[in-house]
Image: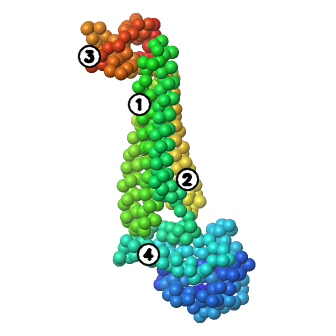
Amino acid sequence: MIKYYNTVDDVNTIIHGDDNVSMVILLIARYSDVKGVYSKLKEDTNSLENLLSDTVVLGVPIEANKYMKTKHGTKNNTYAMITEIINEFKIKENKIPCLYLYDTLDNSHSIVQIDDNVNIYKLLKNIIVARNNYIGKNHKKFNKKQWAANNMELIASKLNGRENALNKFFSKTENIVKLGTLLTGAYTGVSIISNKIYQFSCQNFYHIPSKYFNTDISDKASIILFMVLFMCVPLLAYFEKKYLISDGAGKITVIAGVFSTTIFAILIMCYLNIINLSVILDIIEKRTNSLIVNFIYNNINIIEIVTLVLAAIGVLSIVLFDNIVKIKNKIIKIIIQGVAFVSLFFNIVLFVYSIIFTISSDVSEKTKYEVLLENNIEYIILSNYNDKVLVVNFDMDEDKKYIFYTSQYKFLDRYSGVYRYITLNGTPIIE
């Protein structure tokens, strides 16, 4: 049916006044902006009435009444106060003229922008057909609880011609190939550059040619790559939610699917944050004084708990981003956004510093070494080179500091002798 509105109260009556109405479509437009639309409504009045039925209401400004003849609504010549109405419904001025879609079944709403050339009948038909398709696509027995989450937003998005940029990108095979090539190239480039930096660092520290050092940074590059991939896991839960909604899945299906993926993402982020924290604490232990180190380790349990909690909040902030934006209570919204910002900022800083420390950690800070015992002589292993290990003699001074005698070095079979693992109490002395 078609109803007229002239005030905010009229609009609220149209939306909430009839329990039998399942969907309301409001034409929110000033007459001067869409004269052609108003005049076209006269021609389509009967067709619109047949299309809408008793459960779908089209609300139009009372100004349109001079062009339409229908038995519903009050007829007068008062100009609809569009500005007051868009302020009440918090619609931005640049969205006008538009159709305001409201579903009474789950109180979802969204906007479809129009212009003076739009065919209202065709557009309304598309909206109603799209809505019916989403109801019947996966649920033969439709009820309120099974209704697709954010259905009006989804329908409006499709009618506005907006396509998810991520889906659009990955829908083309060539883009996937390009992305794979880019990631492979980036990984190779980082490995080569970092390996060269590491080789020269080893040469300067041990006074042994750089060509014999070539393994550690490749491992670091792999770690960094996996860390970057792990950081993207929370986005997986977010886009899964978007996909399920776009596929017309019911709320229970959306909640169940997103919940399981979110739990997985939280576990991954917690694990990643602990790794990042351990990397940073290890560097802090080597570079700062004992007072700071003691404070950290005396409060390590609290630090770890805070890190895990912020990891979980960070994931939830990403997954529920669009829900947080729609919170109407400004105070609650500001508080939640503040907590979300702090958690995301903390996680990003932790991640960035971990990568920086991983890349920039100097060989002089290395404290974990393998010791090879062969023919009753112990050697420190500095590197693997082909099927050999690069070794030097070592000793310990009266202060229990290790001394590496790198002026002479040799290569031994990596599969011979007996190995043990040691941790130095500081940077070794190179002689």
Q: Amino acid at mark 1?
A: Asp
Q: Which badge, 2 or 3, is on the more N-terminal residue?
A: 2
Mark 4 and mark 2: Cα distance apart in space: 35 Å
What residue sits 46% from the left and 60% below the top?
Answer: 242
The residue lying at 47 percent from left, 37 percent from top is 187
Q: Nearer the viewer, residue 131 or 5?
A: 131
The number of callouts visible is 4
Tell me the quarter of the image containing the C terminus: top left
Amino acid type shown at disc 3: Ser
Mark in front: 2 vs 3: 3
Residue position for label 1: 219
Residue 293 seen from this side:
no
Name the residue beneath numbered marker 4.
Answer: 133
Can you give x and y, in whole percent of width and height, for residue 367 in the image? 41, 20
Q: Residues within 10 Å of mark 3 (few under 14, many from 20)?
A: few
Residue count near mark 1 (Cα–Cα under 10 Å), binned few <14, some 14–19, many ≥20 = few
Q: Quadrant of residue 137?
A: bottom left
Q: Earlier in the sequence, mark 4 or mark 3?
A: 4
Look at the numbered disc 4 and give the secondary structure of its residue: helix
Q: Are marks 3 and 1 in contact (CB under 8 Å)?
A: no
Residue in view at x 27 percent, y 11 percent: 374
Q: Amino acid at mark 4?
A: Asn
Where disc 2 sits, the SS reads helix
Position of 215 with respect to 201 (left or right) is left
Residue linked to disc 2: 337
